[in-house]
Image (cartoon, rainbow, N blue to C red):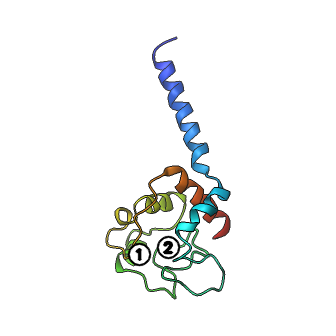
Amino acid sequence: MSSARPIALAFVLAVAAGTAFAAGDPARGQRAYQKCFACHSLVAGERNLQGPSLVGVWGRRAGALADFEYSAALVEAGRERDLRWDAATLDAFLADPQRAVPGIAMGFFGIKDAAERADLIAYLKAVAR
């Protein structure tokens, strides 16, 4: 067996594990959402809280909810970069909101744990469509 094969196999296994890991667990994500619920609602028809409602967030352009006053940076990211909320953009944003969209007003430092972010994203995908 050449030395390249074990390395290639390790790479394939790491990618496969990362893909399964990235799917997240919505039940654990519901617990992770505890960090969000004080500012963001998931109840249809409920008014916006300190942050915008997350109902219908999946696929929505950043800064585009009509009845919420976003920071200029988030509106610009939505318009100029066509930033839309999906698993990849939410992962980057939740990891470090200020790095993902410099200048936003959201006072949240992010979720550093990738598994917790994956769980939260799985939960949002299930309930915030």
Question: Which residue is located at x 57 percent, y 61 percent?
Answer: 32
What residue did someone put label 1 on? 79
- Compared to residue 13, the image places residue 6 above or below, namely above
Image quarter where the C terminus lies is bottom right
Q: Is residue 37 above or below residue 44?
A: above
In the rendering, at what x and y percent does residue 108 appear? 42, 69
* Quarter residue 126 falls in: bottom right
Q: Position of residue 59 (x, y in %)?
A: 56, 68
Mark 2 or mark 1: name the one nearer the start of the chain: 2
Q: Residue 15's spot in the image, x, y percent? A: 54, 37
Q: Circles 2 and 1: CB distance less than 8 Å?
A: yes
Secondary structure found at label 1: helix
Classify mark 1: residues with Cα within 10 Å, few (<14), some (14-19) or many (20+). some
- Residue 61's disc is 2
Q: Residue at x 58, y 44 (%)?
A: 19
Residue 38: x percent and y percent? 53, 76
Front residue (pair 113, 79):
113
Residue 55 shown left or right of residue 68 in the figure? right
Mark 2 and mark 1: Cα distance apart in space: 8 Å
- Judged from the image, the secondary structure of the residue bearing numbered disc 2 is loop
Seen as rendered, the residue at the extreme top is 1
Q: Nearer the viewer, residue 123 or 72?
A: 123
